[in-house]
Image (spheres, grey):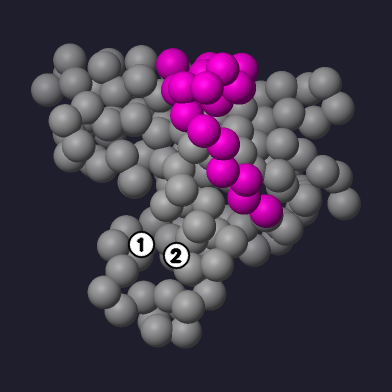
Amino acid sequence: MKTVCLFSDGSCLDNPGAGGWAYILEFNGVVKKNSGGSKDTTNNQMELTAVIEGLKALKEPCEVNLFTDSSYVANAINGWLFDWIKKNFKDIKNVSLWQEYLRVSKPHKVSANWIKAHNGHPQNEECDEMARDQAIKFKTRL
């Protein structure tokens, strides 16, 4: 099983409001990037969407080292999600996105690593810029 690095970030202007997501996938020197957004969303939704879209871009099962500055996403993937499933997502926000995450992550082994935002991490800074650019783009479409 290949081991890939997935860097992700989400951005939301006014939260809720226009938002953007971005990811960077790295494997053996090969880099794949993508970003997108929505005109009406939240920061947590964009953070999670970035991870989902990054996982969707993988063409085969992989060990995925996820790097995110979202403690919400990292903590959920590394622990909370198991309890949420047992409780059938009762009183949990973003259920449809978490169910989508479960679907797209199923073939992979994902481990989430929290990294401090705006701390000079090159891929995190690039994802932040890409996501923010998308949020601005969607805000100007309103």
Give the extent of the magenta segment.
111-129
**Residue closer to the observer: 60 or 89:** 89
Residue 27: x and y, percent?
80, 31
- Residue depicted at x 34% and y 30%: 11
Residue 44: x and y, percent?
34, 46
- Residue depicted at x 45% and y 43%: 70
Q: Distance between the residues labelled 1 and 2?
A: 5 Å
- Residue depicted at x 48% and y 60%: 76
Describe the element under mark 1 as helix, strand or loop. Answer: helix
Residue 38: x and y, percent?
28, 33
Does 9 sit above or below residue 99?
Answer: above
Query: Could you tell me if the residues under marks 1 and 2 are in contact, i.e. CB atoms within 8 Å?
Result: yes
Q: Residues within 10 Å of mark 2 (few under 14, many from 20)?
A: few
- Residue depicted at x 67% and y 53%: 111
Identity, as a three-letter code, of the amino acid under mark 2: Gln
Quadrant location of residue 133? top left
As drawn, the label of residue 96 is: 1
Residue 138 lies in the magenta stretch: no
Quadrant location of residue 141? top left
Indicate left or right for 51 with 138 as reference.
Answer: right
Residue 73: x and y, percent?
47, 51
Describe the element under mark 2 as helix, strand or loop. Answer: helix
- Can I make out residue 123 in this image? yes
Q: How crowded is mark 1: few (under 14 residues within 10 Å), some or many (20 or more)?
A: few
Residue 112 lies in the magenta stretch: yes
